[in-house]
Image: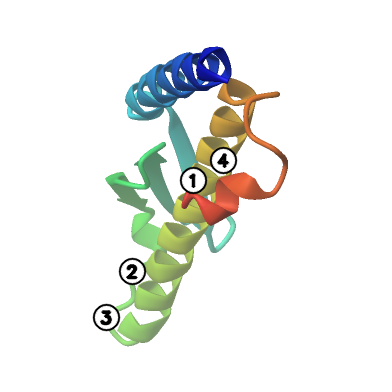
Amino acid sequence: MAKGKGGMMKQAQKLQAKMAKVQEELGGKQVEGDAGGGMVVVTANGHQEILSIKINPEVVDPEDVDMLEDLVLAAIQQSREKAQAVAEQEMQKATAGMIPPGMMQGLGI
């Protein structure tokens, strides 16, 4: 039985190392979210950190700031959702066969 525990420990260490590597790599991945047909574009990395916001001057209307705020918010949310999807996909690849399906969510991954 000790041999089984040792094997599980090695597998857990291997998994931890893979997940750390994926987390590091996610910082270099970029996704874009846009709104208003590309009038507002937000770039985020795989950690869901916002890297840039581009706003087409045509969408800037001092009389309708609410619309611009809505577009920026929508683009930010879309970029974060895409970043989260990329992170989940990369983690699933890294843990393929090591963690049963559905357990990743329970682990907060």
Q: Say which quadrant the N terminus sits in.
A: top right
Gap between marks 1 and 2 measured at Cα:
38 Å
Q: Is residue 62 above or below residue 44?
A: below
At horizontal 70% and vertical 38% (from top left) the residue drawn is 100
Residue 56 or residue 105, whichever sits in front = 105
Q: Nearer the viewer, mark 3 or mark 4?
A: 4
What residue type is disc 4 on? Glu
Could you tell whether 85 is left or right of 74 in the image?
Answer: right
Q: Earlier in the sequence, mark 1 or mark 2?
A: 2
Q: Are marks 2 and 3 in contact (CB under 8 Å)?
A: yes
Q: How many marks?
A: 4
Distance, label 2 to label 3, CA atoms, is: 6 Å
How is colour applied across the structure in the image? rainbow
The numbered disc on residue 61 is: none
> Label 2, on which residue?
60
Whole-Å distance between the Cαs marked 3 and 4? 39 Å
The amino acid type, in three-letter code, at marker 2 is Val
Whole-angstrom CA distance, mark 3 to mark 1, is 42 Å
The residue pinned by badge 4 equals 88
Neighbour tally class for label 4: few under 14, some 14-19, many 20 plus, Cα within 10 Å: some
| Residue 62: numbered disc | 3
- Contact, CB < 8 Å: mark 1 with mark 4? yes
Tell me which amino acid carries mark 1.
Answer: Ile
Q: Position of residue 55 (x, y in %)?
A: 35, 55
Residue contact between numbered discs 1 and 2, judged by CB atoms under 8 Å: no
Name which residue lies at 70% across and 24% down: 97
Residue at the disc numbered 1:
109
Identify the image quadrant of residue 52.
Answer: top left
Q: Which residue is found at the position 36% from the left and 85% from the top?
A: 66
Q: Residues within 10 Å of mark 3 (few under 14, many from 20)?
A: few
Name, please, the residue furthest toward the front: 1
Please tell me whether mark 3 or mark 1 is closer to you in this view: 1
